[in-house]
Amino acid sequence: MKEVILSLTKDELVGFIKDGKYTSPSLKTEGFIHCCFLEQLDYVANKFFTENQIFLVFSNESKLRAHLKTDNGFPHLYREFKSSDIVDIKAVNKVLESYEIASILKH
């Protein structure tokens, strides 16, 4: 069973925790929330985020079940991400120009 990761900024995570769910703008415009697998995390974090710290929300394929589909190798969640989907949350800091993903790979 693969881990599915949702990468969020601090403000997005605070909203997620407060609301008990996360709904990205892409859920309305594209019909799904962009996620990634562990081996894609370095690429996703460094391509799409500029913050000094991001938060990784871990779930797994069994929790997301039929609402998770893979497109071009990346997992897409076709519903809101619920707090009950969360297995773990980790903070990752940016050092120089990239995130410290190696420490997360030991997860």
Image (cartoon, rainbow, N blue to C red):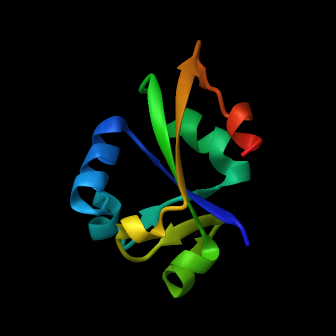
Q: Residue at x 51, y 69 (%)?
A: 76
Looking at the picture, tell me which residue is in the foreground, 2 or 45.
2
Residue drawn at x 54%, y 22% is 94
For the point 74% across and 50% down, the residue is 39
Count of numbered labels shown in the rendering: 0
Residue 85 is situated, as x and y percent measured from the top left of the image, at 47, 69
The quadrant in which residue 102 appears is top right
For the N terminus, the quadrant is: bottom right
Q: Is residue 18 left or right of residue 22?
A: left
- Indicate whether 48 appears above or below 93: below
In the rendered image, the vertical position of residue 96 relative to residue 40, given as above or below: above
Asked if one can make out residue 49 in the rendered structure from this viewpoint, the answer is no
Task: Using residue 16 as the reference point, say whether residue 106 is left or right of it.
Answer: right
Residue 80, how many percent across, how many down? 35, 71
Q: Position of residue 74 (x, y in %)?
A: 62, 63
Left or right relative to 52: residue 12: left
Above-or-below relation of 101 to 62: above
The answer to whether residue 42 of the structure is visible from this angle is yes
Q: Position of residue 82 (x, y in %)?
A: 37, 69
Q: Is residue 32 left or right of residue 46?
A: left
- Residue at 27 percent across and 68 percent down: it is 28
